[in-house]
Image (cartoon, rainbow, N blue to C red):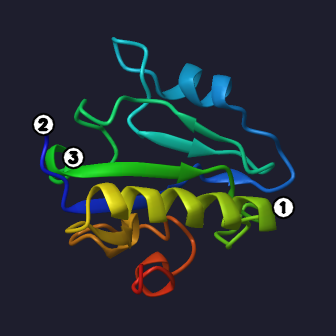
């Protein structure tokens, strides 16, 4: 069993007015085994899909994949393509519920955004996940 000490929140970096389905994510990001680099994906309607088994090392946070789980939400860009917190109410609820469950299963894990990792120069996940979920 892998030891998980990080839960890394990501966005798909897609515009809020364009749908980006689970199937499209898989098509665009599948590895040779057919899995995305993320362990979970949350669409705008709040559906949570496990896209990679938790025991498989992800491909979402270079240098941290062996010890982390990756959670991605659909969106992260406004209609013009600028980084923005585009999470819907349903996504926020689903993300919170998923993170609570993952923290129960991995109580030592710290929740943070991709941008919070050292040497990451991205806005991802386009909100302050580290602060928002620090009390979980």
In the image, residue 61 sits, relative to residue 55, either above or below, namely below
Rate crowding at label 2 as few (under 14), some (14 to 19) or many (20 or more) other CA atoms within 10 Å: few
**In front: mark 3 or mark 2?**
2
Q: Secondary structure at mark 3?
A: helix
Q: Quadrant of the C terminus?
A: bottom left
Confirm whether residue 9 shows in the render. Answer: yes
Along the line of sight, which residue is nearer the eye, 60 or 52? 52
> Label 2 belongs to which residue?
1
- In this rendering, position of residue 106 left or right of residue 53: left
Q: Residue at x 22, y 69 (%)?
A: 119
Whether tag 1 and tag 2 are in contact, CB under 8 A, the answer is no
- Alpha-carbon distance for marks 3 and 1? 31 Å
> Residue 16: x and y, percent?
80, 56
- In this rendering, position of residue 28 left or right of residue 2: right
> Label 1 belongs to which residue?
79
Tell me which numbered mark, 3 or 1, is placed earlier along the sequence: 3
Along the line of sight, which residue is nearer the eye, 43 or 60? 43
Q: Secondary structure at mark 1?
A: loop
In the image, residue 108 sits, relative to residue 68, either above or below, namely below
In the image, residue 49 sits, relative to residue 135, either above or below, namely above
- Alpha-carbon distance for marks 1 and 2? 41 Å
Q: Residue at x 71, y 43 (%)?
A: 47
Q: Residue at x 38, y 49 (%)?
A: 70
Confirm whether residue 61 shows in the render. Answer: no
> Label 3 belongs to which residue?
65
**In front: mark 3 or mark 1?**
3
- Alpha-carbon distance for marks 3 and 2? 14 Å
- In this rendering, position of residue 48 left or right of residue 81: left
Q: Quadrant of residue 30?
A: top left
Rate crowding at label 3 as few (under 14), some (14 to 19) or many (20 or more) other CA atoms within 10 Å: many
């Amino acid at each position: 069993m892998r030891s998980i000490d990080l839960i890394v929140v990501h966005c798909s970096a897609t515009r809020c007015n364009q749908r980006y389905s689970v199937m499209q994510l898989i098509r665009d990001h599948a590895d040779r085994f057919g899995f995305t680099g993320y362990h979970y994906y949350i669409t705008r309607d709040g559906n949570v899909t496990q896209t990679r088994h938790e025991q498989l090392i992800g491909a979402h946070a270079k240098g941290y994949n062996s010890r982390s789980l990756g959670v991605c939400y659909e969106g992260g860009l406004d209609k013009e393509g600028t980084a923005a917190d585009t999470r819907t109410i349903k996504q926020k609820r689903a993300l919170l519920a998923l993170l609570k469950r993952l923290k129960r299963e991995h109580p030592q894990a710290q929740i943070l955004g991709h941008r919070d990792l050292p040497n990451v120069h991205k806005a991802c996940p386009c909100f302050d996940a580290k602060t928002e979920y620090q009390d979980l």
